Image (cartoon, rainbow, N blue to C red):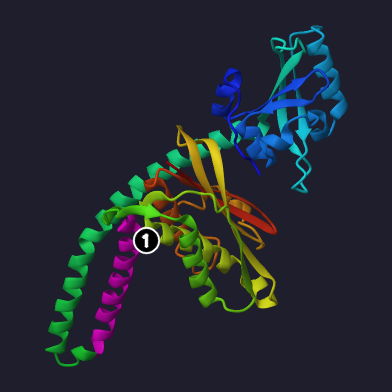
Amino acid sequence: MPDFQPLPAEFAGLDQLATMVVVVGAGGECLLANAQFESVMRLSRRSVHKALLPDWFEDRQRLVDTLAGVAANQYSSSRFDALLRRAWTQDDGLPVHVIVSQLEPGEDGAARVMVELIEISQQARQDREERSLDQVQATKELTRNLAHEIKNPLGGIRGAAQLLTMELQAMPGGAELNEYTQVIVHEVDRLQSLVDRLLAPHRRAQVVGDVNIHEICERVRALVLIEHPRGLVILRDYDTSLPDFRGDREQLIQMLLNIVQNAAQALVGRIAAGDAQITLRTRVARQVTIGKQRWRLALELHVEDNGPGVPAEIRDRIFFPLVSGRDGGSGLGLTLAQTIAQQHQGMIDCESEPGLTNFRITLPLP
């Protein structure tokens, strides 16, 4: 794992970049790498040093030839797309755009080349996140205004139904009609409860204190396992080096509980079969952009499950109010979770396919 030892003063600014940067010799041996490269590759700076960068590429020869050409001053820079291999994952490789540029020789006169690796999906993901945040903000304002407009007449309808009940009781045979007024009262109460849930995150003032994310994970894990004592396993994969941060503990518990319960509900079939699995994974991320704001450090909490995945037709709208992929679902749990994350200057995004759904909660760290 990354140890994030400081770079030499000449290259200290590279750790502030959101892209991966490696400085190599003419033969491809790594002289140094920035923090983003360590984070993506899950390697320490010590293990990267002197390793051969082309060995991490699907087509190593292309990079070898490019490095040699740039180092020999045949051309000053070169760009191409490639697949970066990561030993810890079984995927087909990480698509990256490679930029190879000349550097001044080192103190020993040896040639040096800078290689910048830009995740091809990174820009698309940032655009998607910005678009999602704008949509969620607009939906949140609409929901609040609509909820208030609905709430105002509900009290009058309920009061009128209660008065009508009293009038009916005084009328001959009126008691038989009380069933209808009770239906009105019951439905008004149901709508009132729905409106209260829509407004809940905006009503209560935050109670901010020091929060440990793993205490929150353990609390939520215990609550969900009480509800599903058999057929469900909740695995832990924690980075214990994560620091405490400032936040509302109860709100954050509610946020995570909504997501984990949502995962458990999607796993009903696997729970019955006895092979349902949810993983809680925490990691530190560096140089993270959340809602157009840059943070030096951030916490990433992944909630992964082996369920059927989010239906494709609602995948882009799962954080919108009243959107649910489950029969009988209110469609409010993920909306409230996203609102709480935003109140902590963070966000939640989701990647899903059959057999693996990953909700990633990103919260800035001090």
Instruction: Farthest residue to the front: give it.
Output: 108
Quadrant placement of the C terminus:
top left
Is residue 258 something that shows in the picture?
no
**Secondary structure found at label 1:** helix
Q: Does the magenta portion include 185?
A: yes
Quadrant placement of the N terminus:
top right
Q: Residue at x 75, y 27 (%)?
A: 30
Q: Amino acid at mark 1?
A: Glu
Q: Quadrant of residue 187?
A: bottom left
Magenta stretch, overall SS: helix
Vertical relation: 361 (above or below) 223: above
Image: magenta residue range? 176-201
Q: Nearer the viewer, residue 25 or 106?
A: 106
Instruction: Farthest residue to the right: give it.
Output: 61
Q: Does the magenta portion include 274?
A: no
Q: Residue at x 61, y 56 (%)?
A: 310
- The x and y percentages for residue 207 are 29, 55
The residue wearing badge 1 is 250
Taking 188 as reference, is 42 left or right? right
